[in-house]
Image (cartoon, rainbow, N blue to C red):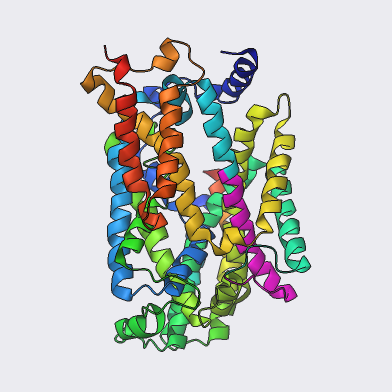
Amino acid sequence: MRKKILAVLSLACLAGCLAAPVLHFLGKLSLEGNKRLFLAASVGWFVLAPLWARRR
Amino acid sequence: MTGRFASIASRMDGLYEFDREPVAPGKLQSGGKFAGLFAGEHVAATEFVIGAFFVLHGVTARDLFSGLLLGNLLAVLSWTFICAPIAVRTRLTLYWYLRKIAGPGLTIVYNLANAVLYCILAGAMIAVSATAVGLAFGIKTPALGAVLPSSLSWVLLTIVIGALFTALAILGFERLSRFAEVCSPWIFIVFVAGGLAVLPRLGVRPGFGNFWEIATTKIWNGLPVSGQDKFGLWHVVFFAWFCNLAMHVGLSDMAVLRYARKWTYGLYSAFGMYPGHMLAWICSGIMVAGVGREMNPGLMAYEALGLAGVAGLLLAGWTTANPTLYRAGLALQTITPGWPRWKVTLAAGAITSVLSCFPVFFVKLLDYVAIYGLVLMPIGAVVFAEHWLFPRLGIEQYSAEKRNWAFNRAALGVWAGTLTACFLMPIHLYFRWLPGYLLALVSYVILSLGRKN
């Protein structure tokens, strides 16, 4: 169960990485905002993904 | 076989002992594993450079899109119809199959050639990563025509990054490989996100209504930058096709595809080609247009995604340089008797770090990729002829193994002769491998007719 939650959260972070430039492209986020959101989502991915990937 | 060769060959056999036997039926892998493997392997730091170079070489948008579609299709078909069937029928790595065909002596030469080529490739990856770190320290990226290091700071930077990559490879290849698996999907996202983030700067409106207009006028506008050749459709088609020539036509991916249940698993290479060698190249083309067509991967990544983009470039370089260093070390181990694994990796890392100082391998990456494939391609032709053509023509197979030859002279002659012929061909470097491959096939059959049963 915990593995599933970690997997969902990390994939949400990966989706966040993609959402940042999409929002910027749509004019809803500045370039700086895009960079900050991408960085935050990336940190989330690298923190969470190894936890469930290691348990596979 | 002379004593010295026998000793080297026996040491080399020991290194590859673990994959000496054909893959057992219980160890065959599912198609999904191959899809994941190909997808992870073909999104590397070098994609930042390759896609950008197409823009600098003045490829038009139409030529780029149609060329990448066709060229990558040809690459997928090469994996499917050339590499996978031989891998599935033999269940052997190229190393062991080549040993039966060409003899242990020629296999040593092939291994050493591979080691040198791997070191240069890893050096190019280090140089690409250096552009990311250099940005923070104000170190200028070498000019497009540069051959020798442009400054002491560039030399120091590449040596430090090379030493760091080497140290990490020595400390734990296995653990790093697992970390690379986590990096792989994120690195692909870095490319897509980078391309998307730059589009508004180039004037593309939400909804992509004017994308084609911007693509044809501001990105792939058909105008090469000063000092670069003009590329057309066939340059793109052939580049996409031969980019992994050593792996498919050169058959080194037999090591992977021997685990496939069916030869049709070669089609899974499309999961590497279309996201990695099409989408990622398109995105890096957009990114270089966003920085005024300056070949500076570090700047391209930073302008699009900030620090995370720079980290993405660094990780892309590192995760691909790491297995490349490992393979180079494995190949070098044949001439370093009794050396432990760390010492060989250190030697490969030292060679690679020195090579990475020379910007020629990074700024001429496209030509290097062509030469890399070209050098190893004749061996693929020799194996293909021996496997498929010899039984049909009634020529004895695996003579080197049966007669205990150290060198199959016909194979050696074909390799050297084909490379000489390719060197002399009055056509663009990118187009030479195909006539070279046909020449190697035909000449190997002719030279082996004496072994007709």
Say whether residue B199 is left or right of residue B134. left
At 43% from the left and 78% from the top, the residue drawn is: A22
Number of labelled discs? 0
Can the viewer see residue B400 in this picture? yes
Question: Would you place residue A32 above or below residue B195 in this image?
Answer: below
Residue B266 lies, in percent from the top left, at 32, 42
Front residue of B301 and B141 = B141
Residue B115 falls in which quadrant of the image? Answer: top right
Say above or below: B382 vs B141. Answer: above
Asked whether B332 or B424 is in front, the reply is: B424
Q: Nearer the viewer, residue B232 or B308?
A: B232
Residue at the image point whose x is 35% and y is 62% from the top: B235
Residue B257 lies, in percent from the top left, at 38, 36
The residue that appears at 47% across and 79% down in the rendered structure is B289
The magenta region covers: B117-144
Q: Is residue B177 left or right of residue B165?
A: left
Could you tell me if residue B86 is visible in this image? no
Residue B323 percent location from the top left of the image: 58, 44
Instruction: Based on the picture, tell me whether residue B9 belongs to the magenta stretch.
Output: no
Quadrant including the N terminus of chain B: top right
**Quarter of the rendering occupied by the C terminus of chain B:** top left
Where is residue B312 drawn, in percent x and y? 58, 65
Q: Main secondary structure of the magenta part?
A: helix
